[in-house]
Image (spheres, rainbow, N blue to C red):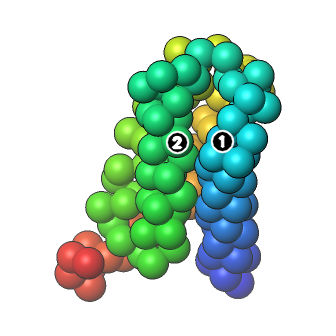
Amino acid sequence: MIRRVLAVFLHLLLLSVVVSCIQSVWVGVMERPRYQTVFPGAQGPMYWVTQLMSLAAAANSIAIALRRRWAILLNPVIGVLSIAVIEFVRGPRVNELIVLVACTLSTVIAWHLWGTRSVERGPR
């Protein structure tokens, strides 16, 4: 029962990450001045870095939902890089906190549910 609740929570969390990342990319593309008001350092190449980090986080969340162990292991790397990029482009601190919490929870819960079990079943 608890594993099912954790799995539902994890999938909702991963879905929220995907939706948030897609929304961020959408605003960045469609309303670039508004995006750069929130992330003032997202100018020139750093604008594209922020967009790519959002896409990477969304893609990795989908891979975690598909139970890819490599994605679970890659998740903390993407999280730390995302926080560093947000800091570099002077984004809101709350965004850094949200990334930290989402990354930590999605990594720990996914590893608990699938990471260790996939070792028993063989690599995915």
Residue 15 sits in which quadrant? Answer: bottom right
Q: Is residue 94 left or right of residue 89?
A: right
Residue 91 sits in which quadrant? Answer: top right
Vertical order, 82 against 60 (above or below): above
Vertical order, 79 against 63 (above or below): above
Q: Secondary structure at mark 1?
A: helix
Amino acid, disc 2: Gln
Between 31 and 39, the one nearer to me in the picture = 31
Residue shown at the point (50%, 69%) measured from the top left: 62
Residue lying at the far left in this picture: please name it: 122
User: Residue 51 location, x and y as percent?
Assistant: 52, 42
Q: Is residue 117 left or right of residue 111?
A: left
User: Residue 39 location, x and y as percent?
Assistant: 68, 23
State how far apart marks 2 and 1 are (Cα): 7 Å
Q: Which mark is residue 28?
A: 1
Amino acid, disc 1: Gly
User: Residue tagged by mark 2?
Assistant: 51
Residue shown at the point (50%, 52%) measured from the top left: 55
Between 69 and 109, the one nearer to me in the picture = 69
The C terminus - image quarter: bottom left
Residue 64: tell me if it is visible.
no
Q: Which mark is residue 39?
A: none
Between 30 and 121, the one nearer to me in the picture = 30
Q: Number of numbered discs present? A: 2
